[in-house]
Amino acid sequence: MTADPRVIASLEASNIRYEEMECDPALADTAAFCEAYGIPIEQSANAILVASRKPEGHNAVCLVLAHARLDVNGTVRRKLGVRKVSFAPAELTKELTGQEIGGVTVFGLPDGLPVWVDSGVLEPEWVVIGAGSRSAKIKLNGSQFEGLVGFEVVEGLAKLPESV
């Protein structure tokens, strides 16, 4: 398998039970991955780096279910305490996390980068998240995020689509 070694070390240090899944790097983006590997979109979660624009320099990594919409202009903006926030561009994501889009995850991140997990991620029996590279994914029980040092579970971090 080819998960980022920092991610595996972080999972092990946190005593997280997980399964590593191989992934064709060309299929690492969520929709393509779910379709190719038969993973329900409701059981896939995306780690998204958000970055403030006014003032600059405030960042956090948010983990939300793939079919949900990150509440960037509401919950995220208020938690960061800034006026404007947006999804970080790929270059900034790589610079701050050391991970590429399509493989970004909440494990193995540099110290000091806040990690917020939407409470909806804790509900499914299992979820698939990034593994720090585009060549692997991590399958785990999302309830393991509850009480995990360095992670904050946030109610309302994401909004489910109306049709769900």
Image (cartoon, helix red, strand yellow):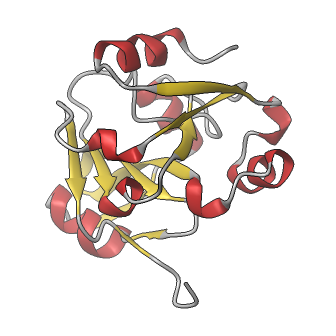
In the rendered view, tell whether residue 16 sits above or below residue 43. Answer: above
For residue 140, above or below residue 162: above
Q: Nearer the viewer, residue 22 or 63?
A: 22
> 144 or 41: which is nearer to us?
144
From this viewpoint, is residue 132 visible? no
Name above or below for residue 105 compared with residue 65: above
Is residue 16 shown left or right of residue 57? right
- The outermost residue toward the bottom is 162
Residue drawn at x 52%, y 51% is: 45
Nearest the eye: 95 or 68: 68
Rendered location of residue 38, percent (x, y): 79, 51
Find residue 21 and report its horizontal and vertical position in percent.
68, 28
Rendering quarter of residue 120? bottom left
Asked if residue 39 shows in the view, the reply is: yes
Q: Residue at x 30, y 60 (%)?
A: 119
Occupied quadrant, residue 106: top left
Q: Is residue 40 left or right of residue 155?
A: right
Identify the residue at horizontal 61%, vertical 18% (top origin): 3
The residue located at (27%, 75%) in the rendering is 74
- Side (left or right) of 38 relative to 150: right
Q: The C terminus is located in which quarter?
A: bottom right
